[in-house]
Every structure is written in structure tokens, then in C-alpha cells.
Image (cartoon, rainbow, N blue to C red):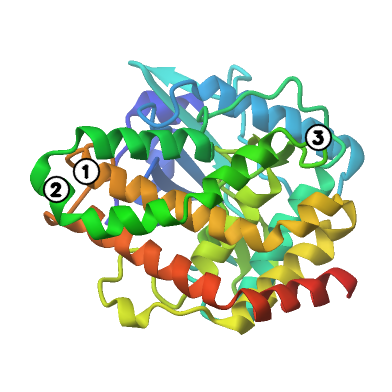
Amino acid sequence: MEIKLNTSILQAFGLTPEQVEIHRFGSGHINNTFLVEKKQDGSKYVIQKININVFKEPEVIASNQRLAANYLAAHYPDYLFITPIPTTEGKELFIMDGEYWRMIPFIANSVTVDEANSPKQAYEAAREFGKLAKYLDGIDLKPFKASIPNFHNLTLRYSAFQDAIRTAREDRKAAAEEMINEFLRYSDIAVTYEKLKTNADFRDRLMHHDTKINNVLLDKSTYSGICVCDLDTLMPGKIISDLGDMVRTYVCPVSEEEKDFSLIMIRDEYFEALMKGYLEEVGSSLSQVEKDHLFFAGKFMIYMQGIRFLADYLNGDIYYPIKYATHNYDRAKNQLVLLQKLIEKEAPLQAIIDKCLVA
């Protein structure tokens, strides 16, 4: 269905309502995204309103992307890195009534998928995230800021989980008691993260931080990787953030929304495909400590997401939108089962990692 955007927004990017057709675009839940097509020549653009409830300082997003784009243009000029199209006044963001808007190019013949439907898709997506990490490996991190502070800080998330247990309503605490105890039983994951944080060989890198497969553009015909997209969370972090989110979202055939927990499983061939794709690109730049914790990446991310869901349930569902009363409880249970399935397969999955590291 065609929709309309405020004329001032279009004019800021050199467009008029008469020139274009506009439709809602994509499956993201954070920003409002629109596809804008010029009637005259069919050229397409994407216009987004940044969600300032999630991204408190949109200027940080713009600055981080500009710094990365400048570095890549200087060192890897052939690499496709999607950057915003400036306004008619040469600015990266258009601000109106406290809302932040930007326009980015639409990449022709590209498609996104919401879940990995084949090992090839997992491989191609992971390889694109690996390329990004490899090409940004030498960049100076000092000018970069966090677009979402403490986004993947498991120490903070674990502390918030403990606070939620202490302050939860008795009925919710009682309902979740068994699951609370199970997550506490895996607290060594948080302890390991705390130790890694201060290890000089486990350094900060410029990471994407949201490596779901729909944040990679694939070729519409071949499903080969084209480039990474949705760079709002591009900021300094650890290798386990990007790799862990891929493990969390690619290897299981069902998402965190699945309530039939019997469907949750670890698909070895998808795990191998994503490890192969990622490590082909970034493997040679990893320290020994990073290599030793590649399996830990999946545990880290699944555990963190699980305790975030459970903490929100205990807090009365104040963060994640819910569709029914036990939605966050079920999401947490889903992630707990996924974590347990992953740990059960540690030996064969570690063997896959070892094979990919020497390939």
C-alpha cells in the first residue's frame, strides 16, 4: 500500500511528493523504514526515521558510520559500504520536530531473508560480517562511541537479572523459580565474560553487534553475499558479539518466538557453514585467546538474551513488547533450551571450529 511522507522530509533530500511513490519496507522492529521510488526513472532509495527511544544520540550513529566509511574508502575502495545520502544542505541527518531522518541508497538486485534457510545462506551472511570485521581491523577506535551503551555488557545484564530476581512480584518469581535456578546454574558464562573483558589479548574491535541474517544483502538470483546493512550498532566491542549472534540466530530452525521447544535443535551443517564463512575472512587476525573462545561466543549471546527475556518477565514486561502474558517467559525458556542444546554438542562443534581454523 502506498503511503505519504511529510513534504519537508522529501524536500530535505531533494525530492517532491509528485516525483515519488512510497511504501513501507523491511521487517525491522526498531526504525520506521520506507522505500521511495522515483516515477520518472525507477531509481530507489530508503528513507528511515531513527528510533530515538533506542538510539538516544542519532549523531553518534552518523559519526561512527562516517568514520568507518572514510577509513574503508581510503584502504578498501572497492568494498561496498552503505552510507547515507546527504541532505540538500550536506548533512547526514535531517531533523524535524525532534525526529531524525536519513536516506540511504537502495542496492539493486538485492534481497534479505529473515532466517537462514540453507547452509549456503548462513555461509554467505557470515562471510560478509567477517569481511567487515577484517577490513575494519586496523581502524583507530578512539573516535568511536557506543550507539547503545553497554549493549552486550553481560556483566551489567547479569546484575540486572539478579536485581529483577530480588524485586520481582512473588507470583512471577514463583512461576519462574525453576528457570531462574537453571540460568543461575550457568552463571560461569558471566564469570568467563568478566575475565575476558580485561584480557589485553581479547581486544576491542569495530563490531556490527546485530548479525541476524536479515542484516546482510544477498543477490536476488544466487543468494551470494553483497554487503552488510543496518549499521546503527556499529561500535567498538568483542568478536564474541558478532559471532555469538550468528550462532544464536542461524543454527536453530526456529526463532526465539517458538513455543514448541521440541523444535529447538542445533543444526551442525549451519554451524559449520557460518564458522567457515566468518573464519575464512577474519580468522588470521584473531589472537589465541579469541580463537580459544569461539565456541563460547554462542553460549555468551544465547545466555545474555535468555536472562534479558527472563529479567523483563520478572520486571513486569517493561522492555520487550509482548503479545500474551507469558511471552517473555516463553522467550527465556526458548533460549535456555537452545543454550542447553548447544552445550550438549560442545565436543563435535569445537571440532568443527578447529577444522575451520586450520583450513
Tag 3's secondary structure?
loop
Q: Secondary structure at mark 1?
A: helix
Q: Is residue 255 above or below residue 332?
A: below
Residue at the (66%, 63%) spot, across then down: 295
Disc with the residue nearer the chain's start (1 vs 3): 3
Residue 314 is labelled as 1
| Percent coordinates x, y for residue 320 in the rendering | 28, 44
- Few, some or many C-alpha atoms within 10 Å of disc 3 (few <14, some 14-19, many ≥20)? few
Pick whichever of labels 3 and 2 is earlier in the sequence: 2
Q: Amino acid at mark 3?
A: Ala
Q: Kindly identify which residue carries mark 2.
A: 172
Mark earlier in primary sequence (1, 2): 2
Above or below for 25 versus 166? below
Disc 1 crowd rating (10 Å Cα; few below 14, some 14-19, many 20+) is: many
Q: Quadrant of the C terminus?
A: bottom right
- In this figure, which residue is indicated by the disc labeled 3? 200
Instruction: Give the CA distance from mark 1 to mark 3.
Output: 36 Å
Is 76 above or below relative to 279?
above
Residue 222, percent across and down? 66, 79
Residue ID at (40%, 40%):
31
